[in-house]
Image (cartoon, grey):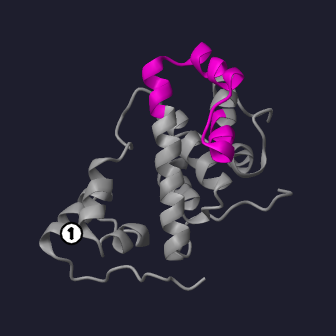
Amino acid sequence: MTARIDPLAPPYDARVAEDLDKLMPPGVAPIALFRMLAKNPRVLRRIRRGGLLDPGSITLRERELIILRTTAKAGAEYEWGVHVAFFGAAAGFDAEQLHATVWGGDDAACWTDEERALVAACDELHGSARLGEETFRALRARFSEEQVIEVLALAGQYRAIACLIHGAGLDPEEGAPRFPARGE
């Protein structure tokens, strides 16, 4: 795919450079998504400030499962690959679990009961932007109200990120993992 909106190239305006630096680990060049957003510095800044990648009320693994499942359901291979590359190992995902974030269901044997509830919630939110009573009850049986709000916010935020990626036509980051083949 050819990018419809080319990412901004350096040198960056001082304020944009500050935002890009805060979005990336030290010494790592900004990814194309952030450089594309930098063409509208206000949007870049709002996304940076509204991000949910800080320690929250759910674990890193739960956060990343929500992001991976949401981006996989939306076909956003770009963001899925970025999160696998930056957070997959720290979140403790193995190859079977990464495959299941793309191709498995909430009934995949690799998920705990908590993870099954998260996958089911991501799937329902992707399909209808709603949670059925059964899915909501399953979440509440395992997570506090504060945590459920974070789950909903993450799924919504990463659905919006998928829209940005697809709308701008971003190719996957160089070196980032791609979706596993269906049969792997």
Is residue 26 found left or right of 64 in the rendered image? left
Which residue is labeled 1 in the image? 16
Is residue 184 found left or right of 68 in the rendered image? right
- From this view, report whether residue 68 is shown above or below residue 161: above
Q: Residue furthest bottom?
A: 2
Residue drawn where x is 28% and y is 71% of the image: 40
**Visible residue check, residue 50:** yes
The image quadrant where one finds the C terminus is: bottom right
Residue 172, quarter of the rendered image:
bottom right
Q: Is residue 136 magenta?
A: yes
Asked which secondary structure carries label 1, the reply is helix
- From this view, report whether residue 152 is shown above or below residue 36: above
Q: Residue furthest right?
A: 183
- Report x, y in % for residue 155: 53, 43
User: Disc 1 residue type?
Assistant: Val
Q: Is residue 162 magenta?
A: no
Q: Residue furthest top?
A: 141
Q: Nearer the viewer, residue 35 or 130?
A: 130
Range drawn in magenta: 121-150
